[in-house]
Image: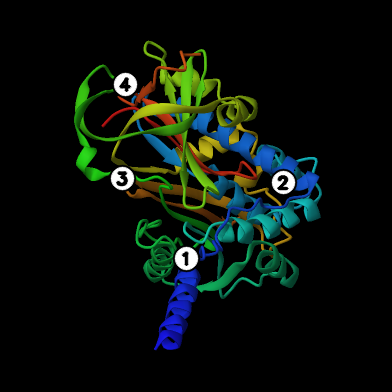
Amino acid sequence: MFTVTLIAAIMLFNNCNKKAEPQKDDNVRKNIELTETQKDLCRTANEFTFDFMKLLAGKEDKDANMFASPFSLQTVLAMTAEGAVGDTKTEMLKALRLSGFSEEDIAGFYRTLIPALQSVDKKTVMEIANSFWLKEVIVVKDDYAAKLQKNYYAECKTLVNDGFDAAIAMNDWCSKKTHGMIDHIVDQVSEEQMVALINALYFKGEWSDKFYEKYSRKEKFNNHDGSTSDVTMMRRTDDMFVVLGEDAWALTLPYGNRAYRMTVILPKEGVDVDAVFEDLDVDSWKDYLHGGYEREVVLSLPKFETEYSASDLCIQTLKEMGLKKAFERSADFSGISNVALYISQIIHKAKVKVNEEGTEAAAVSYVGMDLATAIPRDKPIEFKVDRPYIYAISEVSTGAITFIGIQKQF
């Protein structure tokens, strides 16, 4: 009897030990490995993001909310530039902040970054989809199609001749790739439009440290135009990474395994958000990401949704950045087809939802081509986002900014 009891006790002890063994985390954050050239390209991609957004903001209503993915726009234009030749190509690469890099450097950058951004966190969804559409009457060069498939993982699609049916097909593709967040990008496709290139970006991440709905409450938000609005303010007190700058404070909120993060830049009271936004560049961005330290913070952050779209303003901004010849009938895209083409249409749409669980965001960029005929440490910091602010979603190891926005009113 004693022997049986002893055996049972040993088995129970062993089982308890097995249960007590810690589970191995197979979703530990790992840096995306880039070459030095690819790191430089990532920096210039962020340069394009800031340059484009600041110029676009100057063309928008001064009180308008903005949310976009210049990364998406740069990607689809880089795909287009693969088929540009001569002065058209030189001008496009300069406007995209990609001049000085070889074709293989640029292709290798996207070939590496696109799958890496999608697999860096199993708990966070980041999906990047590219597609290339052409009408049956156009013969695309095999080399160009091969580049898009190899370097940008692009799907090649046929555009039906009926303009409305073609639009339905592309809208359905966008809806599928953005999980329904952006289900409409174009009304119809004109008879002259022979080629379309589309990039779709979808992000869904849960906060690494969630907000609890029971702590959320209605509070006032001071809008950019001087009015106030009632917003649902999410609240959390915890140790967070903060930067206490001269004109603005910044706070970082990680998602999932902390490979992605949202950075909120809050101007100090009395400082205009436009002035802070105008000073934002790759160097100040680096300071906002790495210039602070961990502190206890009492955070209040609005729960919100924002949609934004731009077409003509998008083209005007790109022209101001130096991309002009590509929009002219004299453009040279002979790398795509022997038929003369020029960029006739650019559309960018983006949408974001931020709540207690996390963030869901999507963006679509469309290119249509026509025929040419310091505070005391013993005091918690109160970070109350009750006035216009800037926010961006980026990947940690590369610093690549995938989405950026400026919220001025509710």
Tell me if I can see residue 378 in this picture.
yes
Amino acid type at circle 4 is: His
- First of labels 2, 1 by sequence position: 1
Q: CA distance from mark 4 to mark 1?
A: 54 Å
Residue 20: mark = 1
- First of labels 4, 1 by sequence position: 1
Tell me if I can see residue 338 in this picture.
no
- First of labels 3, 1 by sequence position: 1
Q: Quadrant of the C terminus?
A: top left
Of badges 2 and 1, nearer the viewer stands: 1
Quickly name the residue at label 2.
Answer: 88
Q: Secondary structure at mark 3?
A: loop
Around disc 1, counting alpha carbons within 10 Å, would you say few (fewer than 14), some (14 to 19), or many (20 or more)?
few
Residue 355: mark = 3
Of badges 4 and 2, nearer the viewer stands: 4
Image coordinates of residue 312 in percent, x first then y, are: 45, 40
- First of labels 4, 2 by sequence position: 2
Residue 224: mark = 4
Image coordinates of residue 175 in percent, x first then y, are: 38, 63
Q: State the residue lying farthest toward the front.
A: 2
What residue is at 74 percent from the left and 40 percent from the top?
Answer: 40
Amino acid type at circle 1 is: Ala
Around disc 4, counting alpha carbons within 10 Å, would you say few (fewer than 14), some (14 to 19), or many (20 or more)?
many
Amino acid type at circle 2 is: Thr
Amino acid type at circle 3 is: Asn
What residue is at 46 percent from the left and 42 percent from the top?
Answer: 68
Q: Secondary structure at mark 2?
A: helix
Tag 2 and tag 1, C-beta contact below 8 Å = no
Tag 4 and tag 3, C-beta contact below 8 Å = no
What residue is at 66 percent from the left and 59 percent from the top?
Answer: 340
In the rendered view, does 119 fall on the left or right side of 44?
left
